[in-house]
Amino acid sequence: MSEIVLTGHFWTRGEAGRRAGMSHHELIVHRGVLRLGGHWLDEVYCAFQFNDNGLREDVTAVVEVLDSHFDPATIIDWLVRPHPSLATLSPLHWLDGGRSLDTVLRAARELVKNPPPA
């Protein structure tokens, strides 16, 4: 992927934990949760991965396919960029529209098999 651009709403660990109904520790160790942080950025969680019931199972399933192959920023970028196999919708918009999770999972597995050049 070319330049990564991160947009959207982000929550603190406390906000994300309350929304997910998880302790701070559970949130940190959960494999399907996207979080960013580092020396230059306090830890934040993408708001799009939560709904009124906690963690979105569809987004979590996609993250679990990608997380051992790509860093969180790359996964977030992939989720929000238009994708040719999804009628040029982003994977997130595809899922938000109630479309098939299996289609997004296939696209994610294809990304794992054929990652973009570095």
Image (cartoon, grey):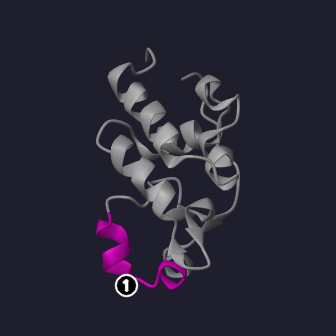
At label 1, the amino acid type is Ser
Of 63 and 73, the residue lying toward us: 63
The mark tally for this picture is: 1
Position of 28 with respect to 75 (left or right) is: left
Position of 80 with respect to 12 (left or right) is: right
Give percent across and percent down for residue 105: 44, 40
> Is residue 78 rendered magenta in the image?
no
- Res 37 visible: no
Instruction: For label 1, count other residues whose C-alpha is less than 10 Å away and answer few (under 14), some (14-19) or many (20+).
Output: few
Give percent across and percent down for residue 3: 61, 27
Q: Who's the residue at 38% across and 80% down the image? A: 24
User: Of helix, strand and loop, which mostly describes the magenta segment?
Assistant: helix
- Res 72 visible: yes
Q: Which residue position holds label 1?
A: 23
Image height check: is 50 above or below 114? below
Q: Who's the residue at 52% across and 53% down the image? A: 40
Quadrant placement of the C terminus: top left
Quadrant placement of the N terminus: top right
Of 73 and 98, the residue lying toward us: 98
Q: Who's the residue at 49% across and 74% down the image? A: 13
Q: Who's the residue at 69% across and 61% down the image? A: 9
Give percent across and percent down for residue 58: 49, 57
Residues drawn in magenta: 17-30
Position of 83 with respect to 109 (left or right) is: right
Which residue sits furthest top? 117
Give percent across and percent down for residue 26: 32, 77
- Secondary structure found at label 1: loop
Image height check: is 39 above or below 2? below
Of 61 and 72, the residue lying toward us: 61
